[in-house]
């Protein structure tokens, strides 16, 4: 169980690019990074392309005005001159900026935490992976839901054979908050997401399904995707060629099958985010809107509801427990868990501790690359008329 004690020698000096007042993810980053004040300390930022707004916002966060910068290049240059300069940067900007900022950060000798989808092309991911290895730095990806510890329970159940042979993977991330064009025109956090030049080749596939696809990789690390078929739609016509709804069929190398539904136009749905793994003996299901419960269904037996933090759960699950079974956890704790693991990974990399890195489960550069591959292959399949394409 986690209780706030330090996992590393001292907090990393941390900065953000983006994540300012008009964004909708910056606060999640800060909740995650600062929930354990032994892991990160926010000391600098280039929070906004509007410098005056950046300064006003940053001062309200408690950051010194002399460490609030008009852009990331200036921040990297000026912080490098300081004996107490930043060591880590989080990138919470639109998709089309991720590659250049990540590359600049690594070249400046910084560890990187970046929003998803990481980049537009797999080749960009491989280039950044090689650069990170050269610079001996960590690149983490904020698949923010993946820190829910019951996913680790699912992972161990799959690993230990509790479900039998894995036959089916059911994935869904849907909501109804983009059923019309209003947000496309009025929301700063939405406008760029429906602009192909800024979001890349997809909308909901990149923005939503990459989260859930990584969750499936986290739970079933030995299950390798062989091929997929994607059909995508733009029900709000002004978004074309970007999709606001998509269905993906999947075939795995071991003969298992799967499907994904990603949608921002599931009218009336507040949160349809779930992962269900079906085996030959039993099934297990996690829903983001019930993050403290895991549905476990053994064929021929009563349905069981497993509750977070209870002693019957695997040790690998309860190691990330924070509040105890009587108290609900949710998305802030999930973000805190992955940020804490980012810090542990960075510390291990700095110390040359490859054993810790090998055994640490967190969304790393490889997870980011697989997310890029997922989006790329889905778009390829859909644009060819909904045909099966090889995943590799």
Image (cartoon, rainbow, N blue to C red):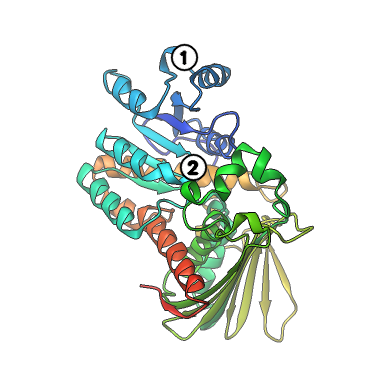
Q: Quadrant of residue 174?
A: bottom right
Q: Residue furthest left?
A: 134
SS for dot 2: loop
Residue 340 percent location from the top left of the image: 46, 42
Q: What's the residue at 70%, 49% (across, down)?
A: 181
Considering depth in this image, is 156 or 181 the residue closer to the camera?
A: 181
Residue 221 percent location from the top left of the image: 43, 69
The residue carrying mark 2 is 94
- Of mark 1 and mark 2, the one earlier in the sequence is 1
- Please tell me how crowded label 2 is: few (under 14), some (14-19), or many (20+) other residues with Cα within 10 Å: some
Q: What's the residue at 52%, 20% (across, down)?
A: 58
Q: What's the residue at 56%, 58% (across, down)?
A: 242
Residue 308 visible from this viewpoint: no
Q: Is residue 80 above or below residue 248?
A: above
Relative to 170, 114 lies left or right: left
The residue carrying mark 1 is 64
Residue 277 percent location from the top left of the image: 58, 74
SS for dot 1: loop
Residue 94 percent location from the top left of the image: 49, 42
Relative to 306, 386 lies left or right: left
Q: Is residue 191 above or below residue 69?
A: below
Considering depth in this image, is 208 or 296 the residue closer to the camera?
A: 208
Relative to 234, 367 lies left or right: left
Q: Quadrant of residue 27?
A: top right
Marks 1 and 2 sit apart, C-alpha to C-alpha, by: 25 Å
Label total for image: 2
Q: Quadrant of residue 106?
A: top left
Q: Is residue 308 above or below residue 166?
A: above
Question: Which disc is residue 246 wearing?
Answer: none
Q: Quadrant of the C terminus?
A: bottom left
């Amino acid at each position: 169980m986690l209780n706030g004690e330090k996992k590393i020698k001292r907090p990393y000096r941390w900065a953000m690019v983006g994540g300012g007042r008009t964004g909708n993810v910056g606060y999640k980053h800060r909740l995650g990074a600062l929930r354990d004040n032994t892991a990160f300390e926010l000391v600098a930022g280039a929070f906004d392309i509007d410098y005056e707004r950046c300064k006003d916002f940053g001062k309200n966060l408690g950051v010194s005005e002399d460490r609030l910068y008009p852009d990331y290049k200036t921040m990297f240059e000026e912080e490098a001159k300081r004996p107490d300069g930043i060591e880590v940067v989080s990138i919470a900007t639109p998709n089309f900026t991720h590659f250049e900022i990540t590359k600049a950060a690594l070249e400046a000798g910084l560890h990187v935490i970046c929003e998803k989808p990481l980049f537009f092309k797999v080749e960009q991911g491989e280039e950044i992976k090689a650069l990170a290895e050269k610079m001996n730095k960590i690149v983490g990806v904020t698949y923010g839901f993946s820190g829910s510890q019951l996913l680790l329970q699912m992972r161990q159940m799959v690993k230990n054979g509790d479900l039998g042979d894995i036959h089916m993977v059911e994935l869904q991330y849907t909501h109804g908050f983009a059923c019309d064009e209003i947000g496309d025109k009025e929301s700063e956090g939405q406008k760029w997401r429906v602009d192909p030049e800024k979001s890349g080749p997809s909308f909901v596939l990149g923005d939503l399904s990459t989260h859930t696809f990584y969750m499936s990789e986290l739970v079933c690390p030995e299950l390798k995707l062989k091929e997929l078929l994607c059909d995508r739609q733009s029900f709000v016509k002004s978004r074309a060629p970007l999709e606001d709804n998509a269905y993906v069929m999947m075939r795995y190398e071991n003969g298992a099958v799967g499907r994904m539904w990603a949608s921002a136009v599931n009218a009336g749905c507040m949160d349809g985010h779930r992962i269900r793994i079906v085996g030959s003996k039993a099934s297990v299901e996690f829903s983001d809107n019930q993050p403290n419960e895991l549905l476990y269904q053994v064929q021929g037996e009563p349905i069981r509801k497993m509750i977070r933090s209870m002693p019957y759960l695997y040790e690998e699950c309860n190691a990330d427990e924070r509040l105890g079974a009587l108290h609900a956890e949710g998305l802030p704790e999930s973000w805190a868990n992955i940020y804490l693991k980012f810090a542990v990974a960075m510390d291990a990399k700095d110390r040359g501790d490859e054993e810790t890195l090998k055994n640490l489960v967190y969304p790393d550069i490889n997870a980011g690359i697989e997310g890029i591959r997922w989006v790329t292959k889905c778009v390829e399949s859909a644009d060819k008329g909904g045909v099966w394409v090889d995943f590799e």
